[in-house]
Image: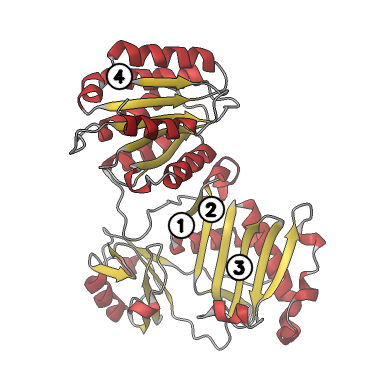
Amino acid sequence: MAQKPIREYDAKNMLATNWQDFIGDTFVNPGRLAQVGPETDLNDLPNHVDWLNTEKLVVKPDMIMGKRGKHGLILLDGSWDEAKKWLEEKRGSDATIGEVTGELTHFLIEPFVKADREFYVAMSSKRGGDEILFSTEGGVDIEDKMKEGKVTEILVPILETIDDVDIEGQLPADLADLKPRMAAFIKGLFKYYQEVGYAFLEINPFVVQGDNLIPLDLKCRIDDTAAFEASKYWGDVGFPAPFGRKLSGEEEYIKMLDSKSGASLKLTILNPKGKVWTLVAGGGASVIYTDTIADLGYAGELANYGEYSGNPSTDETYEYAKTIIDMMTREKNPDGSPKFLIIGGGIANFTDVDKTFTGINKAMVDYKDKLLETPVWIYVRRGGPNYQTGLKNIKMTGESIGVPIKVFGPDTVMTKIVTMAFEDAKGGA
């Protein structure tokens, strides 16, 4: 499962779009939102968003970041003229949040809401079920209020539904007459949270004004493996990189391949000059290999993190492997020492090992000269459908092009090839 954050605009728009189906008429969500991106024409925007010239506004960067208020990155209670001037100053400029600096490219505009009373609600997946947090004192410093016991914790056990849980009975007494409606809202929101594939959802704060319930700040993470069942609720949602991090051309390319595939192709470049590169099948295996490399003291040499899984085609695996091999053979190590390519994975359930290895073999042959010049040593461990044929063929490919290669099946501990590579490096094997 990959938990991915989305922009606040997308999260609020998704909630407003699906509000009636899950929450109904308990409250009304006005859902008035406007997004500003790098190409947005600020002069033309009011022609498409009629309330910009009639409401006081809130404007803030929408960049998967926190602490925007503390860094002077929120315009409150401004007119459209003020908002436009503020956006012209901020858009395209750099901002520093903690130790991270990045360009401000996307912004969210909403009507300004004066909050007399702020509420807090959050939902997240836990080992024993799903946890709901609620407080009548939302807003800043919610962590301190948790320590003070001002946040109600409600667990929905794995084998129970939200309808099995007495939400209203567990809500704080100071809600008074609002208690039944708030309980109904929380139940509907929880059903929405589950149905659309959220792993985490937090609205902090939200306000209630008559029949209106208005989320002022919302953040969430979506389980991207739920796309097959839940994407009908998502709309045209994107998964941007965290603030301050721009995707490389190679990462963008793999992201594009992933979006067009029924398989999973993921790539994050950690250190393009690193000595240790991985071609790992499966998200769980990628975590295990990464942890093993770090535990052995080579975290600083780990070049990439990612996976290919879900039975990708030979061509898809070829494109993925080619991208990895191309990057790792662009430069030699200054001391002339080898680089290591770890081709690992557990025992696949349905991924055809020989089919995917055929793609890797083709990439190895295409980059034969570079693999030898760099040089690259290859270590393979895999199991699953057709693994015997796959291992035989990848060993023959490595030997035929003269690249040092060691190949193992499921009888070898999955991470043993990592230890083996580093031991060979020390011994100059």
State the residue at coordinates (64%, 82%). Answer: 136
Q: Secondary structure at mark 4?
A: loop
CA distance for labels 2 and 3? 14 Å
- Asked whether the residues under the numbered discs 2 and 3 touch, taking CB atoms below 8 Å apart as contact, a structural biologist would say no
Check disc 3 and report the residue beneath it: 122
Calculate the distance from the C-alpha at mark 3 to the C-alpha at mark 4.
53 Å
Q: Earlier in the sequence, mark 4 or mark 1?
A: 1
Foreground: disc 2 or disc 4: 4
- Secondary structure at badge 2 equals strand
As rendered, which of 197 and 356 lies closer to the eye? 356
| Residue 6 image label | 1
Label 1: element kind: loop
What is the secondary structure assignment of the residue under circle 3? strand
Amino acid carrying label 3: it is Ala
**Mark 2 to mark 4 CA distance (whole Å):** 41 Å
Q: Quadrant of residue 375?
A: top left
| Cα distance in 3D space between marks 2 and 1 | 8 Å
Which badge, 2 or 1, is on the more N-terminal residue?
1
The residue to which callout 2 is attached is 222
Residue 37 image offset from top left, x and y in percent: 31, 60
Q: Name above or below for residue 416 compared with residue 313.
A: below
Question: Could you give the CA–CA distance between mark 3 and mark 1, rounded to whole angstroms?
Answer: 16 Å
N-term-proximal mark, 2 vs 4 = 2
Residue pointed to by mark 4: 403
Q: Residue 45, located in which quarter of the rendered image?
A: bottom left
Farthest bottom residue in view:
116
